[in-house]
Image (tube, rainbow, N blue to C red):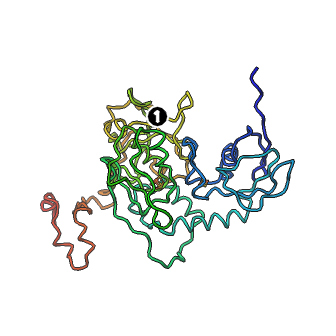
Amino acid sequence: MAEEQKLFTVTIDNITIEVAAGTTILMAARKVGGDVAPPAMCFYSKLQGSGGKCRTCLVEVAAGSTADPRPMPKLVASCRTTVMDGMVVKNITSEKVKDARNGVVEFLLLNHPLDCPICDQAGECSLQDLSYEHGKAGTRYEFQRRLFQREDIGPYIQLHMTRCILCYRCTYIADQLTDTRMHGILDRGEHAQISTYISKAIDNDFSGNMIDVCPVGALTDRTFRFKQRVWFLKPLNAHRNCDKCCGKVTLWNRGDEVFRVTTRKDEWGEVESLEDGKPAWICNECRFHKKHTSDWVIEEPRKINRHSVISAGHYVNAVKPPEFIETVNGGRKPRHLMDIHEVSEVNKPNVHLNELPRSPKTDSYEK
Ligand code: SF4
Ligand code: FES
C-alpha cells in the first residue's frame, strides 16, 4: 500500500495551511495565493534548479517549527527553503521583509535602464511591477552603468544585456529543453553577462521559450519587436496540430492580425501545465512561423487579471477595435506617417523636421 504523504502545517501571514513535506515556503505561499505569495524573479517552478539568485522572495521565519520554535536569525529565500511542521512565516506582514525587498529592487535596478516606454516587455514585465511596488523615484548610484551593444543571438532572438538581471532562467531552459546550450553567463561579478560563445547562434526548435521565461525585456522576439504594445493586443487561446510540440498557445491579436505567439502562462507568469502535468512549451515553428489566424483553431479569449494593463483593451474576441485617430482629430487624417526608426536623425538638434523625407503618400494630403 502506498505510504500516506506526510503533511506539515505552516502559517504564512496569519493564514494556516497544510502542505506536503518538502514543499518550499514559496510554493506553500502560492497555495494561499494573492499578495501572500512573494514575488519571484529567478525561480520558475517548471525549471529544475532555478531560484536562489535574485533574493526578491525573501521572507521572515518567525518560528522555525513546532519542535524548535526559535525564529531564523536572517531573512531566507522562500524559493529555496522548505517548510517545517509548525513553521510561522511572515511576508507582507513583516516590516523587515518590505525593507529588504525595497533594497533588493534598488540593487536590481542599479544597471537596469529606464527604457520601459520603448521596451517590448513593458506591461508584462516582472521588474516593472516590482519597481512600481517597491522602487524609489530616484537613484543613489553614482557610477557609470554597465553598457552593452544589442546582440542578435540567432535568427529569432535579440539580447539587450543592459536589461538582464542575471536570473539564469534562460540558461536553464537551454539546458533542460534543448540538446545544445549555446549560451551562458560569462565572466563574474560586475562583468557577468549573458552571451553566446564566440557569437554562436542560438538555433534549435525550442529556443523561443527563452523569451517567455525572461522576467524582463532582455530577450525579445525579433519577429515582434516594436510592432505593438501588449495592451493594444487581445490574447486568445488557440491550438493547432503540431508534430513537435503540444501546439497550445496564446495568440496576441489586433483584430484578426496575429502579432505574436507565446506559451500560455498561469497567474505566476509561468508556462501552464498540460493534462499530463508536463509544461506546455511550444516550438519555434508554432511561435515564429504561424502568424495567420487561419493557421490556428481559436478557442476563447484569455482571462487577464483585471489589474493588468493588458486588460485595458476592452474589445472582445478577435474583433478589431475602431481606429480613432481621425475621430479625435476632427475628421482629419494623420498628415505624416513616418517610421521613427528609419528617421531617427530627428533626435539630432541640427536636423530640421521638415527636411526629413516623407512617405510618398504624404504629398497628396492637403497641406
Ligand atoms: S536574459 Fe533574461 S532570462 Fe536570461 S538571465 Fe538575463 S534576465 Fe534572466
Ligand atoms: S525567486 Fe527566490 S531568490 Fe529569486
Left or right side of 335 for 280 = right
Question: Which residue position is annotated with label 1?
Answer: 300
User: 10 Å neighbourhood of mark 1: few (<14), some, or many (≥20)?
Assistant: some
For the residue pair 87 and 53, the one nearer the viewer reads as 53
x and y percent of residue 62 in the render? 80, 57
Quarter of the image with the N terminus in it: top right
x and y percent of residue 170 in the render? 46, 49
x and y percent of residue 296 in the render? 36, 31
Quarter of the image with the C terminus in it: bottom left
- At horizontal 32% and vertical 50% (from top left) the residue drawn is 200
x and y percent of residue 250 in the render? 44, 39
Q: Quadrant of residue 317?
A: top left
> Is ligand 1 within 8 Å of the beta carbon of the residue shown at mark 1?
no
The kind of secondary structure element at disc 1 is strand
- At horizontal 52% and vertical 76% (from top left) the residue drawn is 141
The amino acid marked with disc number 1 is: Glu
Q: Quadrant of residue 105?
A: bottom right
Q: Taking 339 as reference, is 46 above or below it?
A: above
Q: Taking 42 as reference, is 357 above or below it?
A: below
Marks counted in the figure total 1
- At horizontal 17% and vertical 69% (from top left) the residue drawn is 356
